[in-house]
Amino acid sequence: MALLEGKKVTKAFGALKAVDEVDFEIPEGEILGLIGPNGAGKTTLVNLVTGTYPVSGGEVFFKGKPITGLKPARVSRLGIARTFQIVQPFPGMSVRENVVVGALFGKNGEARSTGEAFREADRWIDFVRLQEYRNASVDQINISFRKRMDLAKALAMNPEVLMLDEVMAGLNTKDIEEMIALVKRINQELKISLMVIEHVMKAVMSLCHRVTVLHHGAKIAEGSPQEVVKDPRVIEAYLGERYAKARKGPAT
Ligand SMILES: Nc1ncnc2c1ncn2[C@@H]1O[C@H](COP(=O)(O)OP(=O)(O)OP(=O)(O)O)[C@@H](O)[C@H]1O
Ligand SMILES: [Mg+2]
C-alpha cells in the first residue's frame, strides 16, 4: 500500500483543467519526482493533497484512508507537510519564530508546550544549518536561507510525507548541491517519504526513485528518472533541446 496516493485527482478553474484525472502514488520510503513545464499543474496538485484547494474530482488517500476534502490544518496533523514555491514567511518575525509555527501545527504540535516547540524548532534550524541566522529577521535573509527556513518549518511538523515545491529554485550551484544532500538525508536518515517538484534536472536525476510527468494538467509519463528523460513525449513537452544540450555538456 502506498503511503500517499491520488486517484483521478482533478482540479478545474473555470474551463481550465489545471489537474486532470491524475493518478500518483508515493510508496513508503520513496522520493517521487513531479516534473513538467510551467503551468503543468504541479503546485496545484500539492494544494489539492494538502487541502488548500478542494478537488473537483478524484480522491486522495493517506495510509489507505481517504483524506480528500480535509482542511489544511487536519492534513498537517496527520503527518503531511509541504514547502512553498514562493516562501511566504511571517514578516517582521525571526527565523526561529517562523519555524516554531511548524512545531506547533504539525503532527505532534498539539501536545507541545511553547518551550518544547522552540526546542523542536531549534533542532530543525540546526539540521538545515541555519543556526547562525536563528534570531535574524526573515526580512533580512536571502532566498537560499528563506528556502532552508521553509524546509526547517516543514520538518518541525514531523511529517511522514513531505512535499517540496521547487526548493532549489533561485539557488546557486553550491547551494543546490547542499540542498540535494539535505533532501537525501531527509529521506535516508529521517525516513521521510517525499514528493519533489523540481525544474533542476540534476536534482531530479540524483534524488528521485520514480518520476511522474505532468503536461497541461495530465500525466504524460511515469517511470524511473532514466526512463522518463528518454521518453519522446517528455522531451517534446518539457525537456526539449535544453536538456539534450545540457546532457552533452556539463551537467545542469
Ligand atoms: N487559484 C487559481 N485560479 C485560477 N487558475 C489557477 C490557480 N492556480 C493555478 N492556476 C492555473 O492552473 C495551471 C497550473 O498552475 P500550477 O501553478 O499548478 O502550475 P505549475 O506546474 O506549478 O507551474 P510552475 O512550474 O510554473 O510552478 C496554470 O494554468 C495556472 O495559471
Ligand atoms: Mg508551481
Image (cartoon, rainbow, N blue to C red):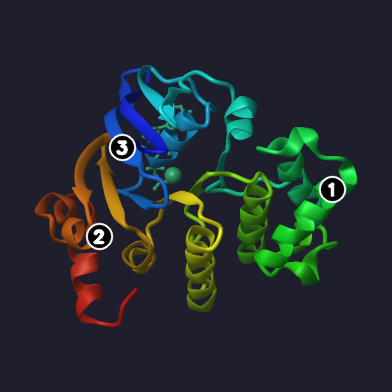
Mark 3 to mark 1: distance in Å?
36 Å
Residue identified by numbered label 1: 116
Q: Indicate the quadrant containing the N terminus: top left, top right, bottom left or bottom right.
A: top left
Label 1 residue SS: helix
Label 2 residue SS: helix
Residue identified by numbered label 2: 225
Mark 2 to mark 1: distance in Å?
40 Å
Q: Nearer the viewer, mark 2 or mark 1?
A: 1
**Amino acid type, residue under disc 1 in the picture:** Glu
User: Is residue 95 among what the camera can see?
Assistant: no
Mark sitting earlier along the chain (2/3): 3
* Left/right of residue 224 with respect to residue 110 in the rendered view: left
Q: Quadrant of residue 8?
A: top left
Residue at position x 36%, y 44% from top? 27
Indicate the position of residue 155 as horizontal and vertical percent values: 63, 51
Looking at the rendered structure, which numbered label has been put on residue 127? none
Label 3 residue SS: strand
Indicate the position of residue 59 as horizontal and vertical percent values: 37, 22
Residue identified by numbered label 3: 24
Mark 2 to mark 3: distance in Å?
15 Å
Seen from the viewer's position, the closer of residues 173 and 132 is 132
**Amino acid type, residue under disc 2 in the picture:** Pro
* Left/right of residue 202 with respect to residue 213 in the rendered view: right
